[in-house]
Amino acid sequence: MTKHVMLNNIAHKDLRVITRYGAEFGDNVSTVLTFPTEYQDMQREYPIFFRKDSATGEYQSVALLGFEKDENLFLDANRWTASYVPGVLVRGPFLIGFQEQDVEGELRKEPVIHIDLDHPRVSRTEGEPVFLPQGGNSPYLDHIAKVLRGIRDGLGIQKAMFAAFSALDLIEPVKLEIKLSAEEAYNVVGLHTINREKLAALDGESLEKLNRAGFLQGAFLVISSLSNVNRLMALKQRKRMQMGRSSGAA
């Protein structure tokens, strides 16, 4: 269930948000949406792929967090082990809505912050305060507003980015085959990435167009991020060893 309402400092003056991470908050996911506006931070920690939305058929950017359903290898009890947390998870119960406002005599739909009051992170007794005692935005809410702007801007950018990549035939499917041992292997399907050879073979005019649009850097960041698959494998091996020691101790 969800209960989305526009955030305001009167009705929600005592509202708090739990900011720790855990399965109880829905953080045990194997993939998470990401956006071009955070590629620079994401590529340092996670492998970035593209996946087609089953409803629209359009590409989305996703970060791979695990190899199995409901597996997040960066989640350790209530702690996130990477230095950068994807914006979609940081935002917690907040989202962008729109409200008609009078702007210089013209009615416009302006973005405003909404909150899901049924979200498990929402609390009245623990967590970060949303508003200051005097009614102003807390530093936490200011940070959330910045995260939401990044998501909104990223949504605006990625449609044009994927159109540019598709026009140059740069997107290719990839089947991720992970073998941890003779007995344990995983196949992750439905993923796409940038074709390195086709990107390298682009003529100067095409490269210039991608660069001017700001998409060339995105393509290189996606390719660079794929080395993090090895990091995921190492995290998986470490968790297997930890589980083995726990079982042995029991």
Image (spheres, rainbow, N blue to C red):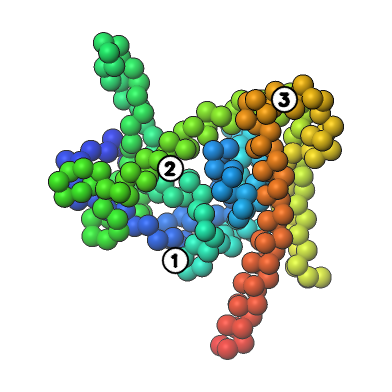
Decide: is 107 above or below 190.
above
What's the mark number on residue 208?
Answer: 3
Q: Nearer the viewer, residue 200 or 232?
A: 200
Decide: is 47 above or below 213.
below
> The C terminus appears in which quarter of the rendering?
bottom right
Res 165 quadrant in image:
top right
Residue appearing at x 76%, y 32% in the figure: 170
Cα distance, mark 2 to mark 3? 30 Å
Describe the element under mark 1 as helix, strand or loop.
loop
Ranked by sequence position, the earlier of labels 1 and 3 is: 1
Residue 5 percent across, percent down from the top left:
29, 37
Residue appearing at x 44%, y 66% in the figure: 78
Visible residue check, residue 162: no
Q: Which residue is mark 1?
A: 78
Residue 123 percent across, percent down from the top left:
27, 55
What's the mark number on residue 147?
Answer: 2
Q: Amino acid at mark 2?
A: Val
Say which of marks 2 and 1 sits in front: 2
